[in-house]
Image (cartoon, rainbow, N blue to C red):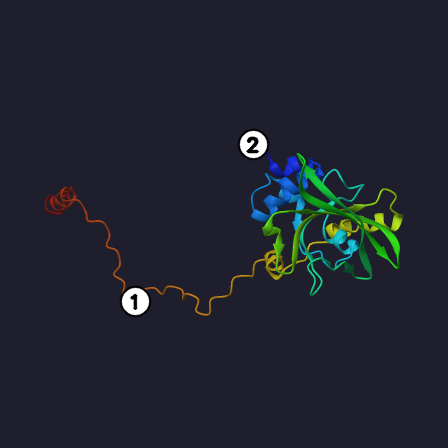
Amino acid sequence: MEGLDVDDVFHHYRLCPTEVEAVTYYLPRLLSGETLHGADKLIHRVEISGCEPKDLAARYAPAPQAVSSGDRFFFTTCKSKRGSNLQSVRGAGAGTWSIQKTTEICHAGVKVGEVKNLSFKKKGKSTGWVMEEYRCLLPEATVSDGVKVFCKMHLAQHAPDAARQESEAYKLQQQQPEAVTPSTHAQKRPPPAAAADPHPPRPKKRMRGAVPVPAPATPSFLMYDEAARAMHGP
């Protein structure tokens, strides 16, 4: 549509894929680099392995229309433990992403992927942050250091106030004043005064020996009339 602002449209759009859509539509296109028709604006391509949810929440705002639930989407690599292709690195800061269950995703009677439900815990207690980690069966999803996955991190239904405050930490970053760079500071300075010319032009001197302008010549008929009066009298 002519004049359509894609950014404005997705500001009012809530990204909420089903399990089948996550592994058959979103993840394959994220792997191949194909367009998601604007939805990729809501998916962050970043390595989240080792990052606590509060750190990710401070860096990335939740998806539009999902502020209360804190939905944040990531395309990332689930790191494998050294020497094992089956176990993943789940430690993150002072906590751990604990797997609650793993479910196969089937479409038309065929397995197309799986989803792992995780809960972030510290000292064995839930923090109120949970995540769904989607995996597909495409061979290109497996990389040298792990598996490429599509994740949805969000608040649990009954998340404590501490987790909800962590989810709103991105607002503090948005409220920080813009740093003044040397270029912008220089633009605000008044323009410098023009420097005085060290060799100002000298005043023009009158030319010496200037020839005076002669008086206008007497018309010839007046000269003849004066001569005749001198000879014959008035």
| Circle 2 SS class | loop
Q: Which residue is mark 1?
A: 208
The x and y percentages for residue 5 are 60, 35
Whether residue 187 can be seen here: yes
Q: Residue at x 70, y 62 (%)?
A: 84
Identify the amino acid type marked 2. Gly
Q: Residue at x 57, y 58 (%)?
A: 191
> Which residue is nearer to you in this view: 150 or 180?
150
Question: Which residue is most to the front?
Answer: 109
Crowding at mark 2 (Cα within 10 Å: few <14, some 14-19, many 20+): few
Q: Is residue 217 left or right of residue 106?
A: left
Q: Does residue 192 sit above or below 148 in this rendering?
A: below
> Which residue is nearer to you in this view: 88 or 219?
88
> Which residue is nearer to you in this view: 139 or 217?
139
Whether residue 39 can be seen here: no
The x and y percentages for residue 145 are 64, 60
Q: Marks 2 and 1: which is nearer the front?
A: 2
The x and y percentages for residue 226 are 15, 45
The x and y percentages for residue 203 are 40, 64
Question: Which residue is most to the top?
Answer: 1
CB atoms of marks 2 and 1 within 8 Å: no
Q: Is residue 155 left or right of residue 42?
A: right
Query: In the image, which disc is placed on residue 3?
Result: 2
Residue 115, located in which quarter of the rendered image?
Answer: top right
> Which residue is nearer to you in this view: 111 or 190?
111
Q: Is residue 146 left or right of residue 103?
A: left
Identify the amino acid type marked 1. Arg
Q: Earlier in the sequence, mark 2 or mark 1?
A: 2
